[in-house]
Image (cartoon, rainbow, N blue to C red):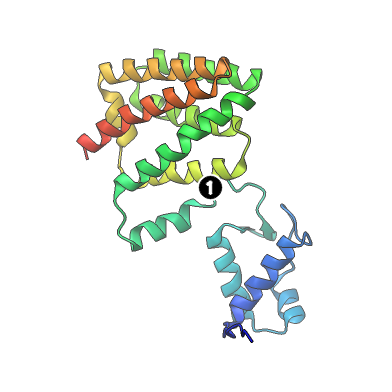
Amino acid sequence: MIFTPIKSMKVYEQVIEQIENMIMDGTLKKGDKLPSERELVERLQVSRTSIREALRALQVMGLIESKQGEGNFIRLNFDESLFQPLSIMFMLQGGNPEEIMEVRKLIEVETASVAAVKINEEQLESLRKLSDAFKISEDENVNAKFDKQFHYEIAQAAGNFLIINILNAMSSLMDSFLKGARKKILVNHENLKALAEQHIRIYQALKSHDPEMASREMNRHLDFTNAYIKKNM
């Protein structure tokens, strides 16, 4: 006979579990407003302190957002929801910044392959414009934004919200733990020229709907940027 250990949960954790279950079974959907704190106290028969602890935890987890004067809502957009918990975990574990680059490369190479199959004409045109703008601009701050947007739009073209969330988190971790990495590599004119050419090759692979070429060009691009960042860490 197998027994399952009985867990002793704090009250606020039980509140979180109930809200999570309501999301899982479809009772609560994106954009839905949660009952007020007073209503939750009455419905769940717990203290206001426990409700507030649960709501704070759900905000940190990225499941809900608080709107001043309106209340608490299930988030509509989860693009940035992984960054805070991953960032805290990374700091507590004493992570090495190189690990961020490794994860980003593992995901982005395959993402380019998936995007090559799914990308549409409108998305291709947006990438073309970003590639052209990146090639012309000589402002590293502007180009850093173009570069970030280029990678983000490839993730969007892959059509998988989990990929978008994970890559957004990796990109934000890079910005936080590899201070100025994007800008440093763009200060050098030769680097800028090389990166512009790499972006164009990635774009052409996506336009050709060639998954192998797209992943290969993305791999080369990330090898180049990662090598430079490691050298200047």
Place of residue 8 in the rendered image (x, y in percent of width and height, measured from the top left): 57, 85
> Is label 1 in a helix, a strand or a loop?
loop
The one nearer the camera, 82 or 207, is 207
State which quarter of the image contains the C terminus.
top left
Tag count in the figure? 1
Residue 65, above or below 38: above
Between 40 and 191, the one nearer to me in the picture:
191
Q: Residue at x 67, y 49 (%)?
A: 76
The residue that disc 1 covers is 80
Residue under the image location 27 percent in, 24 percent down: 187
Furthest-front residue in this view: 1
Question: Which residue is found at the position 57% from the left and 84% from the top?
Answer: 5
Amino acid at pointer 1: Glu
Give the residue at x 51% y 17%: 205
207 relative to 157, above or below: above
Question: Measured from the top left, where is residue 220 in percent x and y?
Answer: 36, 25
Q: Residue furthest right?
A: 27
Q: Is residue 129 visible?
A: no
Q: Is residue 54 visible?
A: yes
Q: Quadrant of the N terminus?
A: bottom right
Is 215 left or right of 125, judged from the image as shown?
left
**To which quarter of the image does residue 47 belong?**
bottom right
Q: Quadrant of residue 206?
A: top right
